[in-house]
Amino acid sequence: MTSTDSPDCLFCKIVAGDIPADVVASSDTAIAFRDIAPKAPVHVLVVPREHYPDVPAFAASDPEGLAGVVALADGVATELGDGQYRLIFNTGPKAGQTVFHVHAHLLAGGELPGFA
């Protein structure tokens, strides 16, 4: 399923350029833009250009695309932070997923409280 197959998807509209976002990096397969409600000094969403509902579907259909998302996140963390980061994929509403276009939350920019 490509981004054009999901016309009501918020992230598909951002990928298409129909909704503005503070894009900090992009590649042929993904874009990275600042979260509108940041939870860390650097909080960027890394989104594949193709539409997949969650990370298991993405990994099963396009493992190279998933690797590309991780590589773009790593580059952004190096560029905007110190190269140390947390990368989170929420899968399902009980886990906090609210937009059902797979995306990674990149958190960086200092000490990150929470998980040990």
Image (cartoon, helix red, strand yellow):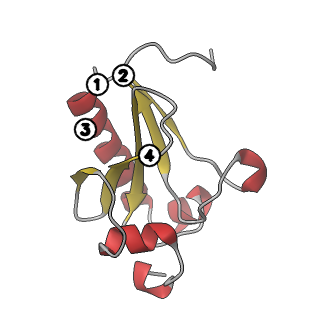
- In the rendered image, which quarter is residue 70 located in? top left
Q: Position of residue 65 (x, y in %)?
A: 38, 61
Q: Quadrant of the C terminus?
A: top right
Under circle 4, the secondary element is loop
At x 53%, y 60%, the residue is 102
- Amino acid type at mark 3: Gly
Residue bearing mark 2: 109
Tell me if mark 2 has few (under 14), some (14-19) or many (20+) residues whose alpha carbon lies within 10 angstroms of its own: some
Residue bearing mark 4: 35
Residue 50 appears in the picture as rendered: no
- Amino acid type at mark 1: Gly
Q: Is residue 91 above or below residue 99?
A: above
* Residue 81 marker: 1
Query: Mark 2 and mark 1 in contact (Cβ < 8 Å)?
Result: yes
Tell me if mark 3 has few (under 14), some (14-19) or many (20+) residues whose alpha carbon lies within 10 angstroms of its own: some
In space, the residues marked 1 and 2 are separated at their CA atoms by 5 Å
* Residue 75 marker: 3
At x 41%, y 74%, the residue is 13
Of circles 4 and 2, which is in front? 4
In space, the residues marked 3 and 4 are separated at their CA atoms by 17 Å
